Structure formats: structure tokens, C-alpha cells
Amino acid sequence: MKKVRMGMVGGGAGAFIGAIHRAAAAMDGQIELVCGALSSDPERARLSALELGIEPGRCYTSYQEMFAAEAALPEEQRMQFVSIVTPNHMHFPVAKQALEAGFHVLSDKPATLDLREALELKTLVDKSNCLYGLTHTYTGYPLIKEARHLIGSGQLGTVTKVVVEYSQGWLASKSDEGSKQAEWRLDPARAGSSCCMGDIGVHAANLAEYTCDDEISDICADLVSTVPGRQLDDDGTVLLRFKSGARGVLMASQVSVGEENRLVLRVYGDKASLEWSQMEPNTLWLKFPDKPTQMIRAGVGTLAPETLANMRTPAGHPEGYLEAFANIYRSFAEQIRAVQDSGTVEAAGDIPSIHQAVRGMAFIENVVTASQSNQKWHAFSLQPHS
Amino acid sequence: MKKVRMGMVGGGAGAFIGAIHRAAAAMDGQIELVCGALSSDPERARLSALELGIEPGRCYTSYQEMFAAEAALPEEQRMQFVSIVTPNHMHFPVAKQALEAGFHVLSDKPATLDLREALELKTLVDKSNCLYGLTHTYTGYPLIKEARHLIGSGQLGTVTKVVVEYSQGWLASKSDEGSKQAEWRLDPARAGSSCCMGDIGVHAANLAEYTCDDEISDICADLVSTVPGRQLDDDGTVLLRFKSGARGVLMASQVSVGEENRLVLRVYGDKASLEWSQMEPNTLWLKFPDKPTQMIRAGVGTLAPETLANMRTPAGHPEGYLEAFANIYRSFAEQIRAVQDSGTVEAAGDIPSIHQAVRGMAFIENVVTASQSNQKWHAFSLQPHS
Amino acid sequence: MKKVRMGMVGGGAGAFIGAIHRAAAAMDGQIELVCGALSSDPERARLSALELGIEPGRCYTSYQEMFAAEAALPEEQRMQFVSIVTPNHMHFPVAKQALEAGFHVLSDKPATLDLREALELKTLVDKSNCLYGLTHTYTGYPLIKEARHLIGSGQLGTVTKVVVEYSQGWLASKSDEGSKQAEWRLDPARAGSSCCMGDIGVHAANLAEYTCDDEISDICADLVSTVPGRQLDDDGTVLLRFKSGARGVLMASQVSVGEENRLVLRVYGDKASLEWSQMEPNTLWLKFPDKPTQMIRAGVGTLAPETLANMRTPAGHPEGYLEAFANIYRSFAEQIRAVQDSGTVEAAGDIPSIHQAVRGMAFIENVVTASQSNQKWHAFSLQPHS
Amino acid sequence: MKKVRMGMVGGGAGAFIGAIHRAAAAMDGQIELVCGALSSDPERARLSALELGIEPGRCYTSYQEMFAAEAALPEEQRMQFVSIVTPNHMHFPVAKQALEAGFHVLSDKPATLDLREALELKTLVDKSNCLYGLTHTYTGYPLIKEARHLIGSGQLGTVTKVVVEYSQGWLASKSDEGSKQAEWRLDPARAGSSCCMGDIGVHAANLAEYTCDDEISDICADLVSTVPGRQLDDDGTVLLRFKSGARGVLMASQVSVGEENRLVLRVYGDKASLEWSQMEPNTLWLKFPDKPTQMIRAGVGTLAPETLANMRTPAGHPEGYLEAFANIYRSFAEQIRAVQDSGTVEAAGDIPSIHQAVRGMAFIENVVTASQSNQKWHAFSLQPHS
């Protein structure tokens, strides 16, 4: 089996998320990193690529150069998809140009800077012959597949309530603002209209919609800037109504001192309920009104085929964040092969696509707008707010 | 040391909460049950009292009879306080008459049916020479004392966020409505204007205010009736602002399938944060931005004097709900002794009093009113809403 | 219902375990403390009894005086059983004299100083008309009843392995030896031939035998004195064989720094297995080869009648050590009533009796002897070793 | 940076452990799989290699062929090390020949079939210019590095007791014996003299020795075959003495129904103690006699450099078994580079080497021999027992 050929934009030496993406792409031996435009600094770009073992001729100094040069290579050699791991404001322009050059796109989250761009991107994707994927990592965990399966197959009955929380503490004080990670996230020009909701609240919303196979229809939002002087939110709560009639509560925070990545999802149905925590991802709790709670474990007993397909190790050998990430990469690679084989573009894989990209940007804009109003409830809209 | 003499109204054979109160009162050997009007059914009242070893002459058939007869006894014999464990709508009339007859009152929660009654009760308490206590049990846990101490002594820095949740699942379906417990709680005539918030949401609010030594100033509320046909709420979320400037989220539910008594409190400060769960009450988590989380355990290391005063067993021998309840009884008995010794009524003890009783009823009314409005934020008011 | 009348020997002001016993006895309102010989210091004995509300005429200065005086009272008034909470070396003489005076005995553990005394005590019990109970507290936990039920009803299949551990850390250093608690436990004259095994190892052995309804048949033992200069063991491991053919491992330690009361029992069968931890006693884990582990919780779903009979609170309201202790007292009081009603002595109740008392002392002697030998396996014997 | 070139022996299509090794090798992008002799079936070997993207000319049908052919390639192209993932009985012959052909060896555990072979292998390694590494995976977890650092830097004081357990349940019944995994493990010809101790007990022993930087000096062993008809042990307990004077308990089981991979290590010192569980590997508990237990988490606060060097993700993003495995591969690749750079072979890396290989095989033989004797204690010997 030939490996799927990947190019990377962003992720030069020292960049955190690029290394995560590369590990995820490499893990299953199905993807090969063949070229890169790893830094906006041309020299650093070239050196980073060499360091990663990319052959010198395919170490590019800009994404424009990369797309042009790769497109000119024989089909058997040229990169098949681009992984975009730049700062947020570059996601859209890189994705746009990649699609126009005929390359599949797997983009770090968020898809774009705002909803307007996301809708434009959707138009581009729809008319292209290319796949578009978004790395909402948390949907890649095997037991999230199991949770989705349990809900979808009716084992919870009618879903009545969803509680999802994503709390971190790393921006809790003024002195935390110095890091590179913090700086751009708190800057409206580079982060968009929201810090906390844009960075992690949107993961929580995506996880809830994905797991329940449902969509948010109305919101009541309360965002705050806890640390004085911040222009953007660092904490917030959103009350939810879903299309199904279920209601929900979404909490997100970057100022909850001592929390690492407390992403916890609870779904209550009228027959049973479930709870999952990202920090112990190999356990899923299934609760009943009148019998013992079950501890569903990755690898134990009967699991859904899609759960099994997203596992690599036997019971009791924990898998984690990189494996969840790798599941998205592997699924994307499989889609690319399917497109090659069939000749038609059909995003059959179980990974977030342009639809989720648009909903994510809409979530951020809706929440920011609703928070500024003293009206309690607002319909969730897909129209840009600005 | 002579035992403090207690009478009981309500709690006849088969009543659940009466037995809990009696176990709590008995545990420390400082309180003696000397008389009772245990049921509105005179014969059942008498039999229940005999069953409990109350001497026949002090088994009364009504609380009116009990107060009159006991008041006529020599001071050395007569009951000193009444424990009220009737259905909610009787709390106020019994407490009123007890105060008027000169007896201290320890009442099951909620204090009254509505805020108007609570304010009237406060007037009565203030002009009496009697103590009034309310059994918000959860404030009796030793590690809640420790949490309050840690916050009060500044170890969390400035409190920025409070998350408190009380979720149960026992009213999740139509078929759960048949029990005696369910029936009156869902009936506006007997339960007042709220089911879920009145029954357990108010515990959560009290626990947050007590632990943080702070008061709610503004709310945004969303109550729902999940099961069709219910007149009162069975689930709700309230966004909070506190007088200190902290914000909060309060969730309460009686329809969260599989939850037993998930009462969890988290308090985030700018220096540290803490987390406590009622179902594992002997552990308190203290979290920091930059060093390992500490597992504070009842009985281990240095604890505040008020924490130690509320413990009975050494480290690793778990205490629970009855002990928390007993802490309130013991503290109330100590107050009564102090009143006897000093001749002046001063509620020095660390248990919920008429102030919390009024705030609790106000919480319920404020939340119900705010939930009915599409205005987001509402000031927390101590004026009756009806 | 008239309360059962209890006298107490030991447990004067400041004594820890006496207060625990009194709380346990008081909790259910079925037992009344009517007399006491609470201290070997006559004046302290009298004052302690007064402090506890015992009437002056029944505050005795010695147990001999108490038994004589109480025996002379009318049957309706006199104490019915004695609770023995003295230091260990007094358990036997007090119990002996109580039985001879015709009083039922409920004794703190261990029953006697050595096996020879225990066998003598058994002879006395057998020929008396009195009940004898031993407060192996941990068997009083509701979910231990459930575990015993699950095993007894075959839900684990054939039991193959038992792992039981009781680890503490309070004697880990030389400087811990100063306390009153430590002093006598490390003194062969007062503690007998073992410190760690005699104090807590024997609890672990009792818990395993009780829960599995099985008996140890062979042992391989390794006791150590971790802290230099100690005459007795402070840590040890015992390999076990049971009469049923199951094998086991028993670990006990008083020098495991940071452990509170880590008493954990695991029982493996060929169909299922279970795990229970004293420090979170309201949860019992039931594990299967091929399906999710079940979290059995006190109060949730279907439980055995004997489990329910040993609970006082609804699901999610934790019960603890005092309640487990109270279960033993309540059961003993019920046995006394049954003896009164039937006129015949039959220890029908589910609490440790003289049989367990003998086995406990035998366990200690067998382990000490086996540890001193370089032969691996030793048959468990009921003959005194000295 | 050029990737280190790896060949693989064993691990053809369908083999479980081969895929694990490949994922571990691929994850960090520093190792390239360039050739393979993946199956003893020549056709399957060739097809498997093609499937993995190995170029056809380097898909070999036997390891002998592979070593010969690769040795003949230019140094710049030829494989640098071989990863051995065959069944156990082939580990030694493949490693032997690889060393003789001048290739570094990274071998799946156990190193050989018995101690005699292990000692012979050590002789070969010592006189070669090659590195030898053994994938005792569990030592690759970051918090095991931290534990080793805490112990080594004296933060536990003097280590007094080590408790290590590795329990599984997958061989609990006769019907489990049909799988390929089970079959060879229960066959003395292919598995050697022990099943449970050889397969997982040896991991536990290695983990204890590695973390404490200590060596077992004496043992008392009790192995059993729980399921009738088995020739080899499926469960066992070993009492330990270490050279430092610490004592220990090692439990291993393959018949503990419901256990997945319960590998738990506890180390008690006279100042502090620690506990770590493989199934939640990102948490390390540090316990003290007189202050709160600390929850050390991967990524939080100050950690040892060697801990940080073995992490890939930020706090709260769990890493697992594959990452631990990858740490061993990465460290081995770094050693190979260091050997290349320096020209001298020095196993500077922090991974198990031939010394651990010999000790592991000695552990198995010592335990089997000691278990057959009714003498309690046996000195741990490095002499072959047969």
C-alpha cells in the first residue's frame, strides 16, 4: 500500500501544534510527509523541513510556492493533501489557495477567522473536487464513537439534557499573558471576536453536536473577561436548546485555576445517561435509573464497530490524545484513497468537515452577540453578524 | 452534663426524614427525645411516640397540645426545643406557635412555603427569646468547614467563579410520580412555586453562599419541566453574580437519570481553587496553577479548628451524611446550653439560621420569576414576588 | 419499644474508642447507656459517667462493683449487656466476669490477649446463657453484606483468589511511638505477640473469611519490624489457602507512609470478581470477563435484604464507619430482644461471635509462629502455640 | 536529520505486537522502516512488507537472508537496527545473528527462552560493537521517570517497602485457551518455564527494580495453576528482599477476572511514598505522613528533565501506552546516532539493556525454582537453574 503524501504549512521548529499533527499523521504508517512550507521565515522554513527529513527540493519558503511546485510534479509524486497548522488568521487563505490548486485540505481548528470566511470557504469546497477536514480532535476518541453509537441506537431513550464543560486554568492571571500562545489568543486581530469560546468553547459545542448527532437551535450566553484589561472573553456559560428539543449547558473557561483540560461531556436521556471525560478517555460511564452504573472501557466486551476501528491497543493499555488525533488523520487518508479509487469526492469518513467548520464559526459569533444583549434567548443563526 | 430535651413534630412511623433527624440528634448523646406530636393522625402519633420510647404522657396528638402541655411542665423537665419534620406547608405554622410558646426551633428545610412567610417568621424570631435553626445539612460536613476556612483566610485569593451542581435522577419519568415523596413535591399547593429549585437548588445556593461567605446579587434563570404535564420545574440552571463580584453557575436537576445526590461545589480563585463532592465528602481537592493538586482529607495533617470540631473519627474512617446532620444538631444543642448559661439569645453557632431561611425562600422566588422573563439578568431581591 | 440497657467498662473521658462505641450504640435509639465503670481511676470513672448523663448511683468505680450492683437491681432496671472498651489485656477478665454474672457481652476487638484465653472464653460462653459479640466493625458495612450475598449466591462462580490489604502509616517512624495509642500496641505485655497483625491484620483476615464464608486452612507468613528497636511486627504479608481451595494474599502494614485506613478486599471467582474499599464504602465493583464492570452502590437498584437492612440513608447520601459500627450494635440489641422473647440463647444475628473471636486469636498466633520458621507452608491450627 | 533505518523480524499481517512496535517507531518521525522479514511463511512475509510500504527489494523471506542482504548494502542505505517481534523462542537466535552481522538489536520482551540463553546473549553483546535494547514498555512512561527521580533524589527517604502488582483476567477459564496468544504462552516448549511470571510478572519485577534503582536479592515464591490441566503457572505471589534492605510483595495473575492490565506500583519510604497505575499513567500520587497527598500530573508544575523529555503533549492531554513504547524507540534511535557520532558503543540511554535482559530471565527461573520448594526464602541467583 502506498502512503498518502502530505504537505504541511506552518509547524516550523518550536511550533507546538505542528509536532502534534506530524506525530498523529505518522503513527499508522499510512501518511508520508513529503513537502513543507513550515515557516513564514523562508530560512527557518527550509531548515525546519530538512530537520524533519523532507528532501531539500521540496522544502518551500511559502505556501504559494509549494502549491505551484507540487502541482507541477507528476501525479505519482506530488503531495495529495495539505495539513494547515499556521496561526488562525492564515487558515483561510492557505485553505482557499490549496483548494484552488486542487489539493485536499486538513486544517487545524478554527477553520477561519470568522463566519463570513467560513461560508466563503464552504462555497469553495462545494465547488471543488477536494476533501476538506477539520481537526476537532476530541471527536476522534474511540469512546466518543461509542457514546455516539449508544445515543444513536436509542439506548439513552430521548435525550433531555446535555452538559458539556471545557475548563482550563492557564490564562488565570495577568502574568500568564506573556507567552506566545496567550498573546495571539487575546488579540482580536489574530484570534477573532472571542478568546475562550473561540479556542475551546467551540470544541465543546462540536463535541456535543457530534456525539448527540443534534444541532444547537437557541442560546443564552454570558461571556466574561475575568482578568482586567482583556478585550476578549476568558470564561463563559451558554445555555442551549437543541433542534431535538433537548436542552443543555455549556461552560468554558481559561481562568479556572488548576484545571488542565477538563473537557467533560454528559448526556442525559429518559432511559439512561452517559458521562465521559477527556482526561480519562478510555472510560465511559453509562448510568441507569434502577441498576448499577456500567463502566464501559475501551477494549472490554462488545463495542460498536466504529469504536473498535478507532482503537490500536488491547484493554487496559491506555490510548490518549495523539491516538485520537491520529484517528482523524487516518480517516482522512482513507477518504483520500477512496476518492482516488472512485474518482468522486464524497466525504464518507467520520471526521469533521466543512459543515462543522461553518457551524463552529457560527457558534462563536452567535455566542458573542447573544452575550452582549440583555435578551435571554437568541436563535442560532448561520448568517454572519458583522 | 444533662442532655438537651427535644420534642418532635412530624416524623411518625414510616416517615423517612424523621428517622434521619432522630439518628442525628441521638448520635452524640447530648440530646434526648422527650416528647412528640409525630403524626396528624392522633392514634398514629401516639403509637409512633411509644415505639420510640417516649413516655406515654408526653405522646401528644397535635403540636398545639404539645406546646401547651410542655409549657406547663417544670422548667427542668419540659422540652427545650422542637424539631420540625412535617411536610413543608406545616413548617411555618408549627415554628410560629413554638416560638410564641417560648421554645427554640430547629426546622427541616425549607423554612416556609414562600418568602412572605419567611419574612414573617424572621420578625417572630427577632422579637422572641428563642433560637431558630434550619437543617441545611450539607453545611455540616467537616470539609465544607475547611473549604470555608480556606476561602475566608485568603488561600484561594480573590474568588472569581463558583460552580455548584445538585443533580438527582429520581423524578426522570412519569412513572416516578407515584411515590409519596414525589407527589407533594410536584404539587404547588404543598411544595410552593418550585419543585427542583425549592427542593435541592436551594441547598446548592445555600452551600455556595455559606462556603464562600458571600451572597448572590443577580441571577439569570432557566427552569424547565422535562416530563410533560408537570406544573413545576424538575430541572434548571441559574447564572449567578455575587456581591463580591464573583460569578457563578448553579445547576439543579431531578431528571438526570442515574445521578444519586450529585452535589458538587467548585470555587475558583485567582490563586487556587477547590472542589468538593457530597458523595465522597471526606476529600477536598485544592488546586494550584503551578504545582500538584492537593488531596485534603478529613483527619490528615493540619486542619482548621472548626473542621476538627465537626469530625468524630480518625483519618480513613469515613463519616457521612448522618454525621453532617448530627453536627447541626450538636451545634444547636450547644447554642441552647450557651443561651441557658448566659441568659441572652445569641446565635453564635455555625448553623443556618433565620437569615439563611429568608435568603433561601427569596432564592426560590427570584429564580421562578426570572425564569419566566426573557430579560437575561435580574437583581436578587428580598421582597416577596406575589 | 423499650430500649436495651447497656453498661460500659472503659471509655472514660479522653478515650477514643469509647466515644465511637457510644455513638454507634446511640444512633438508632434502641440502646440506652445506663451504667458505667469507665476508668480504672475511680474518681475519673465517676466523673466520666456523670458527664455522659449516667445517673450518679450507677457510676461505678470498678467493673466488679458494677456487675455486682447491677445484678442486684430489679430485672426491669438492670443493665442487659456490657460493652467492653478497655485496653486489650482487660478484655478477657471483664468478659469472663460479666458472663459469670449473667450479662451479655459485646467486646471490642481483639477478644483476648492470646488464643489460650480465647478458648477459655469460648468455654465460658458456651456454658452460659449469654450472648457474646465482637466488634469487627468492617463486617458491618452494608456493601460487605452485599458482597457476601453475591459470593454466597454463586454470582462469582468458584472463588479462586482473595486479596485483602489493610495498610496504615501512623507507626512509620520512631517519633510516632510516643502516643498512648502506639505505646501499648508496641508492648508485648499489653498487646500480645503481634502489633500489626494483632491490631489490623486480624481485621483483614476476619473480613476475608466473613465475606467469602470460608476459612483459612494454611498460611505462609513474613512479618517484619521496619522501625529499628521494635519487639513486635509493624508490617507483614501472609499467603493463604482456604478450605474451599481458594488461595489468597493478605497484606497489613502500620508503616506505609501516607496510608490512612486502606482496607481493601478483592475476591476473584471464575465467573466474576468484586472489589471493595473501606475508605469509599458505599461502592462495590463487580467485574466480569466480557462485559462492563458494574458499580454497585448502596441504595441503587436491587440489593439483598441484608444489605438494605444495614442502611439508613437513601442513595447518594454516604454512610460511613459509625454506621457500620452501629449496625453491629443494633444487631446485638435485636439478638438480646430475641433472647428475651424466646427464652433461649441463639446467636442468630449477623455479627462476629465467639467463633470469630477464637479464629482471630488463632490467626495471630499462627502467623507469628509461621513467620519465625523458614518452612514455607503451615497448617492453620486452633491449638495454642505456647 | 536523517531517519534511523530499521528492519523488522516478525510482525507480519495480523500479528498484534508488530503493529504496536511500528506505531511506536513511527510516531516521532525519527525512524524509518526500510526492510523486513515479517513472517516465517515466505509469501506472507513478502506481502506483509509490501503492505507496509517497504520497497520490494527489501522484503525478505527470512531473517538470515535479510541480515546478509542488508549487510551487503552501502552503509548509507543499509538498515541500522533490527526490531525483533517474533514469538519468544526466536528472540535469541535472531538477536544472536543480528549482532554477529553487526546490527543493533531492539528486542521484544523476554530476551530469550531461558537464563542460559540470556547469559550467552550477554557475552555476545559485550563483545560486539552493537547496542542491545529490550522493550520493557512500562519503564517508558514519563511519570515512571518522575517516580525514579523522586526516589533517587531522596524525597521518599529510605525505601522500606515495594508493592507491585500486574493482574489480568484473560486466561481465567479453560475456554480462553484457544486463542493464538494463549496457546503458545501455556506451552512450555515455546514459553519457557513459566506463563504468568514469564509474561507479566517479569514486567512487574523490572518496573520495581528500575523505579527504585535497586535489585532483588531474595525471594519467597508461590506460583499456582488455577485452571486445571495447565502445565505452567497462571498466577503467583513473590515476597521480595532488595539489596538495599527494602522488602516487597509482587503479585501477578492472568486469571483475575475483570482485570485488564492492572499494573500498579507502590513504593513506601520513611518520609513519603508514591503510587502509580499503568491504566491511568498520567497521574502519580505522592503521599506524606502529615500533609495532603499530592497528585503529580504529567505536564503540571516542576518535573524532572527526564520526565519532560518523555512527554509529547501539554497537561491534560493524556498520553498512553504507545507513547511509552515510542519513548523507548526514540531513546534507542538517539543512542544509535550517538554511537555513530562518537564511534564508540556506550548504552547511555535510559532504556532496558542486556543487564535487564539477564535479570529478567533470572527472575523467572528463580521464582519457578523457589516455588517448587517448601523452604521459604531463596537467594536470587544469576546462575542457570537447569
Image (cartoon, coloured by chain):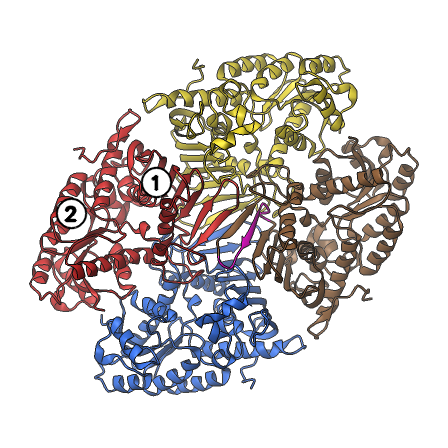
Chain colours: A yellow, B red, C blue, D brown
Could you tell me if residue A377 is visible in this image? yes
Q: Quadrant of the C terminus of chain D?
A: bottom right
Q: Where is residue A106 in the image (x, y as percent from the top left)?
A: 62, 23
The magenta segment is D279-290
Question: Upstream in the sequence, badge 2 or badge 1?
Answer: 2
Instruction: Tell me the subunit letter for badge 2.
Output: B
Q: Where is residue B59 in the image (x, y as percent from the top left)?
A: 14, 64
Instruction: Tell me the subunit letter for badge 1.
Output: B
Could you tell me if residue D15 is visible in this image? no
* Location of residue B348 with respect to A144 vertically, above or below: below
Q: How many labels does the image show?
A: 2
Q: In which quarter of the image is the N terminus of chain D?
A: top right
Residue at the location (40% across, 42% down)? B266
Could you tell me the amino acid type at mark 2?
Answer: Phe
Q: Mark 1 points at which residue?
A: B253
The quarter of the picture where residue C369 lies is bottom right
Residue at the location (65% across, 56% down)? D171
Residue A322 or C63: which is nearer the viewer? C63
Q: Position of residue B39 (x, y in %)?
A: 16, 57
Q: In this view, does B297 lie to the left or right of D19?
A: left
State the mark number for residue B92.
2
Residue D13 or A237: which is nearer the viewer? A237
